[in-house]
Amino acid sequence: MLLISDRNRGRATLAVMVAACLAGCASPKDRVAGELVRAGLAEPAADCLAGGLTDELSIAQLRELAAAIAMVKRQRGPDAGPVTARDVLSVAAQIDDPRIPAALARAGAGCVLG
């Protein structure tokens, strides 16, 4: 039978908590940027847009935008290169929720004007 001292049990618990936090404690901005990159947007553009989008949109709206971007990427095919900011704006304009393209336009303007 394996006996773990209270001191070692505390260390083990702390190690598990730190590992779990590192795996799941990314900021909302980092998670959105990662999703945008996975959807096909180039990393610098995704990083820039993510801050403004997380400030203005709900999780459901962010998911809807990411799904629309991913659809454009699939339609373009694997050899078409990354999705551009123009592609994203075009897709966002077609989403029924007017807050999504408006937030994207403000975030994009912030990226350009910095």
Image: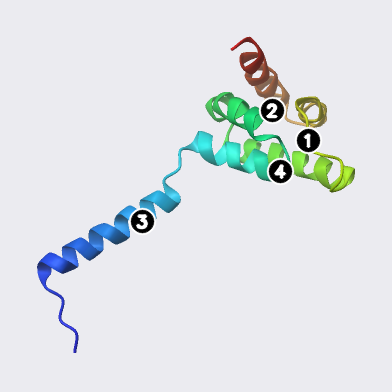
Q: Which mark is residue 39?
A: 4
- Quarter of the figure with residue 36: top right
Residue position for label 2: 100
Residue position for label 1: 83
Residue 112 higher or lower than 51, as above or below: above
Q: Amino acid at mark 2?
A: Ile
Distance between the alpha carbons at the discs numbered 1 and 2: 17 Å
State the image coordinates of residue 7 (x, y, percent, origin top left). 11, 65
Specify which label sits upstream in the sequence, 1 or 3: 3
- Dot 2 crowding, Cα within 10 Å, few <14, some 14–19, many 20+: many
Q: Amino acid at mark 3?
A: Ala
Q: Are the residues tagged 4 and 1 within 8 Å (C-beta)?
A: yes
Query: Looking at the image, which is closer to me, 100 or 34?
Result: 34
- Mark 4, secondary structure of its residue: helix
Distance between the alpha carbons at the discs numbered 4 and 1: 8 Å
The quadrant of the rendering that contains the C terminus is top right
Give the tally of numbered discs: 4
Distance between the alpha carbons at the discs numbered 4 and 2: 16 Å
Taking the spot 73% from the left edge, 30% from the top edge, the residue there is 97
Q: Nearer the viewer, mark 2 or mark 3?
A: 3
The quadrant of the rendering that contains the N terminus is bottom left
Distance between the alpha carbons at the discs numbered 1 and 3: 33 Å
Q: Nearer the viewer, mark 1 or mark 2?
A: 1
Specify which label sits upstream in the sequence, 4 or 2: 4
Specify which label sits upstream in the sequence, 2 or 3: 3
Residue position for label 3: 19
Specify which label sits upstream in the sequence, 4 or 1: 4
Look at the image and name its color scheme.
rainbow
State the image coordinates of residue 6 (x, y, percent, origin top left). 11, 69
